[in-house]
Image (spheres, coloured by chain):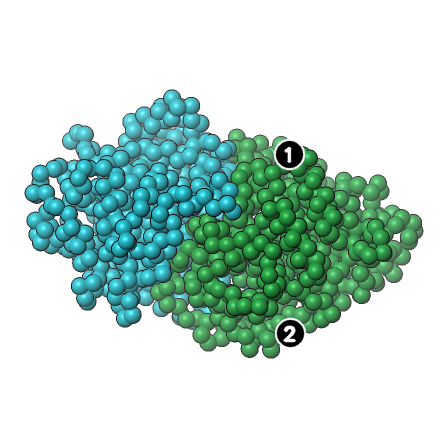
Chain colours: A green, B cyan
Amino acid sequence: MSSESNQDASGVNHDLSPRQHDQPPSRWQDSEATFLSPNLANRGIDICTLYNSNFQDNEAYHNDKYQQSSNTLGFFNLGISENKLCNDLVAHRLCQSGMSYVEDIQLQYSSPRGHPFLRDAVARFLTTFCRAPQCLSLENVVVLNGCSAIFSALAMVLCDPGDCFLVPTPFFSGFIFGAKLCANVELMPIHLETEITDEDTLPFQLTVGKLEQALLEAKTQCKKVKGLLLPNPQNATGHVYSQESLKEFLEFAKRNDLHVVVDEVYMLSVFDDSVQFHSVLSLERLPDPQKTYVIWSISKDFGLGLGALYTPNEDVAFAVSPFSYLHSISGIVQYHLRCLLRDRDWIDRIYLPAVHSRLRTAHAYVITTLRELEVVHNFKIFFHSRSCGLYLWINLKNLLEPCTFEEELVLYRRFLDHKLILSRGQSYLLKEPGWFRLCFAENHQQLTGEKEAAGLIRAPRPLARTTLPAPGTRGGASRGAARP
Amino acid sequence: MSSESNQDASGVNHDLSPRQHDQPPSRWQDSEATFLSPNLANRGIDICTLYNSNFQDNEAYHNDKYQQSSNTLGFFNLGISENKLCNDLVAHRLCQSGMSYVEDIQLQYSSPRGHPFLRDAVARFLTTFCRAPQCLSLENVVVLNGCSAIFSALAMVLCDPGDCFLVPTPFFSGFIFGAKLCANVELMPIHLETEITDEDTLPFQLTVGKLEQALLEAKTQCKKVKGLLLPNPQNATGHVYSQESLKEFLEFAKRNDLHVVVDEVYMLSVFDDSVQFHSVLSLERLPDPQKTYVIWSISKDFGLGLGALYTPNEDVAFAVSPFSYLHSISGIVQYHLRCLLRDRDWIDRIYLPAVHSRLRTAHAYVITTLRELEVVHNFKIFFHSRSCGLYLWINLKNLLEPCTFEEELVLYRRFLDHKLILSRGQSYLLKEPGWFRLCFAENHQQLTGEKEAAGLIRAPRPLARTTLPAPGTRGGASRGAARP
């Protein structure tokens, strides 16, 4: 696991009911009582409990990975939002001349904000790919070893213990580890609905009305709301905000004196040409620049750890810098990153076209396979996909009897019995049971396989164990759920 | 700055009196009031205040470094404990064949404990260099991006907010950032004396009696003491514990049910062949293995970020693993580290002999220069050096009038006026004003220079500004202070 891993992370589900005997070994599988180690403080137990309830299968996966040559019975992990489709291109580029250059400065402690050569490359890269109206300055860039580290540091300096941030939900709940457990900052969900309410809305749609309502509810609970965490593209639904919506959200934040942390980690993962991404940095005017922070990572694109903060607010950039003490990046990697980010020819001509093309192919393959599964099982699999990001959501609530989060967990474990890891909706604080996130930016080998053991082909088994309802006997996903 | 940077970090000194006009620019130099940004929470202001009071000159240094070719009037930084003497050898080794190999796994999220290939290399390396009686297992190793990250994670899981650890003082107070500000764990100093008290003691000597006394005092103050942080070699005095002392300290911890975090970051920096280092992992029997944790980093040796935890306690290893989420190391660097650590021939024949030889040379140069300064100024410079580590301590209390921490700061700033950064004793929670830490593991260019602008040659100017007392008119360092 690393900075951006987001398989099943939340602070909500602590259900740890005993597994069956055929389940993979997990140190903490038996019950929460196992955590009552005399050596851990209560906080340590809380950390283990959160980790166990959300990342419990991560170690099992790492100890028993599927390998085409040596371990065809190992785990498939479609639960981690990681783009493995272009590792070959990055590996090839990293082996080219110039990359192995090492000088003293790479082996020495860098400036707390990161080496200027990398911050300059980040500022230039963001200027171009965010379509900033003016050149962004390296002085406003701080780099740490991942976006989770950046958000955790921001939470530390913008909030006092007990303060909270609003966040549209479902969301990448890995942020909870850094925010809640480390910084003691609460993430208050703004629940987005999968069911549409009128003709003009989409599933999971965020509106200013919902923001206003969430803020009011928080105040009713006497919460001190300090800010809004706004991922765009929305993580974990893949929704891309229109420029108009973006402005409205920023104006809402300004009206209410809230910080806005805009998480643009997935900005390069929009693989559908008909979808237009608008970075907050592309706006001619930010409503409240001193309270606006853009966080970006290249881990979803290049597979190297980097989280970058861009903010016009010098106070906050200064306050976040000392965290490099805990979240530093090796100078060698900083140099690699600089070389990659500055190689515009390679990025424009080779890398990004390949990323988008391969994402489209993998996405189409998964859609096709889901349809085939429908046919084989005579069972409709509703799904939600926005042609952006590395994953889609499938709705299997028709398989839950009753339709509860307990049954969602049972189904999750049934996949796990067949060594297929998906992410559960509950881990993303989804209010409606039955949703599973499936990451398709996976080596084609794992998705397709040459043997029946592989990838999605494993899915039918858990499905087959269930008494399937007749198609359409319970409502599926909302009307607006995108179909290919 | 990065994981192990330890220039002047403490939570004690918040004295920020205004600088003179000829002082280097610093964003926060005017007063603490500057921190009262409306955008930062109180915690953010605390973080800035700590950072400013202890790392305030770090950014100035990074923006205006001495460069032999281009900036001969830039800053010299002898305040950071960083071994720059062998960067050339590491850079050369990193450019050799095999190092530029990149495979998929290096670009993907690793196991939360780190890639097994690196943990295996760390276990084997520590088995050899710590002289472990049995082979250490990779299962007991967790790697994060620095020792500060490891200690911060340990503090989080072993302590609840408000709990405390005892730590022999002066100490590497950089730990305060992760412990106090991030984990809300107090580091309670066990003050070691520079003056010797009887024939059998040395300056800065730790004894069981002092441990008992510190524990009693903490309990009197109703503190909940959870553990003992025990750096060996002692950071920041360079003291190496005898095996007998080490056992006594561990027995003390066991009697009092305390965790012991043994920080062996400097174990390879013992450059005097007559000094024998004993790792806690060399002991045949640990008094309380379930409460013993060894942390080690190679940043002092190889200049690459890695903090490793070795502990027989599986609960704690499990609890620390999720922190990889915030403190990960790039897979590429994990691979580089593996290659370096496993190249025993290079380490044994080339690297470590060079490290020790160059440390001896630099140490001898600094000692000689200090003697020359004494002669030129007719002023005795007492110092403390243990032939271990990357620095020594000089005592300039004879220059302070009165002998207070305020005057220590004035002298520190006078060095700074001449763009020479040293570390102040107060930053290490030393009780006695006048001590300065001087890191000699610096490029020879900076220490010696070809022009009078360079390195230590700058020191006489601040000294000359002071009305020097007649030699020996006030007591210098204690009798036991080592001399070459």
Q: Is residue A202 left or right of residue A85?
A: right
Counting from the top left corner in percent of width and height, residue A301 is at 60, 64
Residue at 17% across / 54% down in the picture?
Answer: B461
Mark yes or no: residue A86 visible: yes
Question: Percent from the top left, x then y, of residue B390?
Answer: 28, 52
Q: Residues within 10 Å of mark 1 (few under 14, many from 20)?
A: few
The correct choice, above or below, for A95 with respect to A209 in the image is: below
Q: Amino acid at mark 2?
A: Pro
Alpha carbon distance from label 2 to label 1: 49 Å
Nearest the camera: B56 or B145? B56
* Chain under callout 1: A
Nearest the eye: B475 or A412: B475
Q: Which residue is mark 1?
A: A222
Residue B115: x %, y % from top left: 52, 55
Tell me the residue at 46%/31% (across/down).
Answer: B163
Is residue B175 placed above or below A385 in the rendered structure? above
Amino acid under disc 1? Cys
Q: Cβ–Cβ below 8 Å for labels 2 and 1?
A: no
Horizontal and vertical percent position of residue A412: 74, 47
Please name the residue shown 70% across and 67% down the image.
A276
Residue at the location (89% across, 48% down)?
Answer: A474
Q: Is residue B177 left or right of residue B196?
A: right
Q: Quadrant of residue B96?
A: bottom left
The residue carrying mark 2 is A353
User: Which quarter of the figure is the N terminus of chain B placed in?
Assistant: bottom left
